[in-house]
Amino acid sequence: MSDAQVPIGSAVLGAGAPTLVATLPAADHASTMRAAHHAADAGAHALSSADPVAHTLAAAGKETGLPVIAYVTSTDDAERVADHADMLRIATGDPHLLRAAARTGRPILLERAPGTTMTSWLSAADLLADEGAPGVALGERGNDIGTILTLQNRSTRPIMLDPHTDPALLTAVSRAALGAGADGLFLNMDDAGTAALLLHDLTVTSALLSIRESPERNDAAPQSGPVPELTRLRQQLDVIDEQFVRLVARRHALATVIGEIKVRHRLPVRDLRREIQVLEHAKTLAGRLAVSPDTVSGIFNHLIDDAVTAQCAALPGRHAP
Ligand SMILES: O=C(O)C(=O)C[C@]1(C(=O)O)C=C[C@@H](O)C=C1
């Protein structure tokens, strides 16, 4: 693989579709796990955290199945953090730390240290690669789209932006970064609801960007070989479909547990008021995300049927509702 692509677990930085990394809040274990699940449900591809302690982040990665990117801040810590993370994140040009991190065998995201020139930043990235890091990506914090544009001509390594900006400008900065060629973004999950909507918005944006970037978009002539932008978009659909089926499996498992509780409390399997609530909630969200409420309620009717079937199947002595 060239240095333009860096695999981290199930994700690949620089593979075409932008990688969206959710930054989990530095909070108690339960809140961090909740934020991680929100991020996974909303379509994040990887998890990170501003908190240098890697244990909770590693647990969140295990629970959601998403790769994790963890900060290394001292030479002594490199091995320990590498044991828990799929990628190391470094925010300094200290050559001792860079060497220690490279030798762990993990891919590395090198952020530009404050006050560092672009040349020494890129040299530090080369040092990491020379010292054996299996992949090196560049990370920029802030809202400087100019850096992303300049990097297009100076480096082939993937570029990630961690936008630090007025929340009102977050979507605009994120879209501009992707338009300028960033390979991915970090998104703060402090406000899980907003972040989930932004993740959705960016998934759509990135799909649109890959259409716009295609040189063949106006070519009406019939294609004989594979059409690149179609392949790219189908790959994105494959990822979404896989996430979707995983969510269906999680819902099914939860419904089964609910079924056991109902037996213990002698409650009926069906609760029509709850079903209406579930459907209304899904349709409202569909409206907010500009998806057809009918399509969504069709899917949810199937999901509720699946839950009812699972609960009935687990009760050999009981009859279907
Ligand atoms: O909430 C419950 O009681 C469930 O069993 C879950 C569920 C659903 O799929 O959302 C399924 C059956 C009930 O009729 C109501 C809702």
Image (spheres, rainbow, N blue to C red):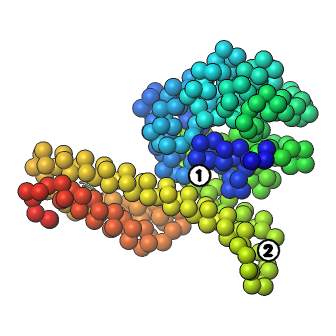
Given contact means CB atoms under 8 Å apart, are the residues at marks 2 and 1 in contact? no
Residue 307 placed where, x, y %? 27, 59
Left or right of 68 in this view: 242: left
Q: Which mark is residue 216?
A: 2
- Residue 146 visible in the shown view: no
Query: Which residue is labeled 1 in the image?
Result: 199
Q: Residue at x 53, y 43 (%)?
A: 66
Residue 132 placed where, x, y %? 76, 30
Q: Residue at x 70, y 73 (%)?
A: 226
Q: Residue at x 77, y 75 (%)?
A: 217
**Crowd band around label 1 with a 10 angstrom C-alpha radius: few (<14), some (14–19), many (20+):** many
The amino acid at mark 2 is: Glu
Q: How many marks?
A: 2
Classify mark 1: helix, strand or loop: helix
Quadrant of the rendered structure where residue 158 is?
Answer: top right
Q: Where is 264 relative to 299, above or below?
A: above
Rounded to the nearest whole Å, what is the CA distance between mark 2 and mark 1?
28 Å
Residue 241 placed where, x, y %? 50, 61
Q: Considering depth in this image, is 313 or 18 the residue closer to the camera? A: 313
Instruction: Give the mark, 2 or 1, whose residue is nearer the N terminus.
Output: 1
The amino acid at mark 1 is: Leu
- Residue 116 visible in the shown view: yes
Q: Residue at x 86, y 44 (%)?
A: 155
Classify mark 2: helix, strand or loop: loop
Q: Nearer the viewer, mark 2 or mark 1?
A: 2
Left or right of 196 in this view: 281: left
Q: Where is 26 relative to 146, above or below?
A: above
Q: Considering depth in this image, is 246 or 144 the residue closer to the camera? A: 246
Q: Where is 163 relative to 259, above or below?
A: above
Residue 22 placed where, x, y %? 59, 42
Q: Residue furthest top?
A: 76
